[in-house]
Image (cartoon, rainbow, N blue to C red):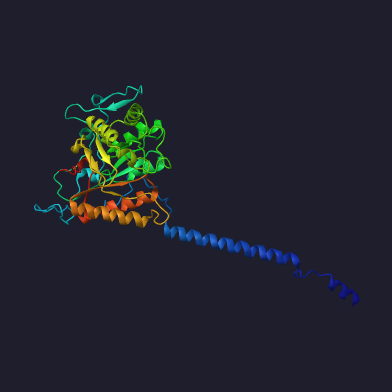
Amino acid sequence: MAENAASAGTEPGPAPAGPVAARYRGLLMFWAVVLGMMAAGAVTLQVLGPVRPTPKPTWQTIQLPPPVPQPAAPKPNPAPANAGPTATSAPTPPAAAKQATLIPPPDPALREPAPDYPGRFLPIAQGERGPATVYAAPFDANDKHPRVALVIAGAGLDQDATLHLLADLPPAIDVAFSAYMPEELDDQFAAKARQTGHECLVSIPMEPALFPLAEEGAHSLLTGAEPEQNRQNLEWALSRLTGCVGATGASDGMLGERYAQTATSFDLVLTEITRRGLLYLDPRTGAPALDKADPAMVRVVSLVVDPPPNPDEPVTADTIDNRLAVLEHMAATHGSAIGLAGPPKPVLLERIAIWAHGLAARGITLAPLTAIAPAAE
């Protein structure tokens, strides 16, 4: 029986489950899942169809939106036919006020060589053709509204401020250039002024009221100088620029009052300037023209917008605004007025730009100096 038991222990039976069988079972389950997902994907592709690439847009396929129609600009209301000099309705601005108009370049027929300064030229008149008419900015002579002119003197020394003045302020504002600005900028600034529609004047350095505490440089006209020296200095100043409508005694913040009070010497200066077809702007407010000067060629400043500061009343934005309002009131009351300002500084240019922008709406026309009638008329 022991043998039978031993024999029975040697018969083969099923292999017990071990670690190897467990590994094969996990592998089979993994592939079963993969094959199931592939089958599901194939069925989905059959239903959706093949994937087609999206074509890139070309100029034939791009559809631009239709342009948005712009509303027509409203037509300005014409000024009433019976509008007088004190009309309060806003004038229709002339084309020159809307867009800068070129002023003609220097005419060779309206200049002659400067005897004492080779290579430079002096302005001259040919009959009725003179610098004051040929280089005048365009203006609508039929405008019946009160006119105000503004001249900014002392330009050319501060290059940035001068470029800002010429490029950004209304063309009707006149610019008086300092005779002491760098020589290489003379023609550039004068050309820029004409291109932007600004009339230009040349400043004549003259002995100021506070001389010698304040002085106008080596080429200043002085009460104690020899007449020949003053003649040469006048020639020097007038030869600095060509293509200008006139000259002024306002120079670099000074007004040349002391020299202008010497009747004989100043009368000769006025005679020489007007003989050459130039306007003269007298910066002394209310000062009468002298006997020998042609009154038709002289204009007198009504108000200095930025008088020299003093400890009690510095020139501020409020000061400039107030004086511009006074200048505007003078124009409305008398039919015209001339303001003087400068040298150009940022606060001055900013306040002038704001003031000038609203003039038309208040019934005042900003006009170039040549459009202001002489006081005698």
Where does the image place residue 264, in percent across and percent down from the top left?
27, 34
Where does the image place residue 10, in percent across and percent down from the top left?
84, 70
Between 3 and 287, which is closer to the camera in this rendering? Answer: 287
Left or right of 152 on screen, residue 333: left
For the image, the number of numbered tags is 0
Left or right of 131 on screen, residue 313: right
> Would residue 73 be seen by someone viewing this image from the given angle?
no
Between 180 and 78, which is closer to the camera in this rendering? Answer: 180
Between 265 and 206, which is closer to the camera in this rendering? Answer: 265
Left or right of 3 on screen, residue 177: left
Between 376 and 154, which is closer to the camera in this rendering? Answer: 376
Q: Is residue 44 above or below residue 85?
A: below
For the point 34% across and 40% down, the residue is 258
Which residue is the extreme one toward the right? 2
Where does the image place residue 151, in percent across and percent down from the top left?
29, 44
Which residue is the extreme one toward the bottom? 1
Quadrant of the image containing the C terminus: top left
Quadrant of the image containing the N terminus: bottom right
Where does the image place residue 43, in percent across and percent down from the top left?
47, 61
